[in-house]
Amino acid sequence: MTLSPRLREIVDALPLTPGARVLEIGCGPGAAARAVAARLTSGHILAVDRSAAAVAQARAACAEEITSGRMSVRRVAAESFTPEPGEGPFDLVFAIRVGALDGRHPEAGRAALRRIAAALAPGGRVFVDGGRPLRELRVGE
């Protein structure tokens, strides 16, 4: 799976550290999550999407990263997200083209931001597309 120039720019802009615990909301087929997993050594990325088809695609495309323990994938909507045992807290959360977080669905967005804030580690940061290339959201303040 190759990374588009736009996704590469977004992943490059994330303030990743090798041991970060990362959550991607709306992972689609897993391209960005796979690129993040490649930059983690002791860290982990949880990639979630509301679409069963997207989750199946991500699991298939990212089998090596999942087997390595650097990545896991599950189906859940942003506004329903609650970390399962062993997931989180997250140092970094990001979302690309997620309606609940880009203003298209304000009610779902408020619910999603409450869920994200509850899953963040102290000092955790949240990024969405729409900046150059990302913008940071202030949550839980």
Image (cartoon, grey):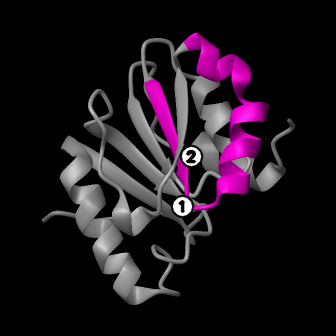
Task: State the residue at coordinates (56%, 46%).
Answer: 13
Name the foreground residue: 85 vs 34.
85
Name the foreground residue: 17 vs 61.
61
Secondary structure at numbered mark 1: strand
Q: Which residue is label 1 attached to?
A: 134
Expressed as whole percent of the image width and height from the top left, the position of residue 111 reads 30, 74
Q: What span is in magenta? A: 44-68
Expressed as whole percent of the image width and height from the top left, the position of residue 110 reads 30, 78
Task: State the residue at coordinates (26%, 45%).
Answer: 124
Quarter assignment of residue 132: bottom right
Mark 2 residue type: Ala
Secondary structure at numbered mark 2: helix
Q: Which residue is label 2 attached to?
A: 13
Q: Check disc 2: other Cα within 10 Å, few if <14, some if 14-19, many if 20+.
A: few
Expressed as whole percent of the image width and height from the top left, the position of residue 134 reads 54, 61
Expressed as whole percent of the image width and height from the top left, the position of residue 118 reads 19, 54
Mark 1 residue type: Leu
Classify the position of the N terminus by image quarter. top right
Name the foreground residue: 13 vs 77.
77
Name the foreground residue: 105 vs 52.
52
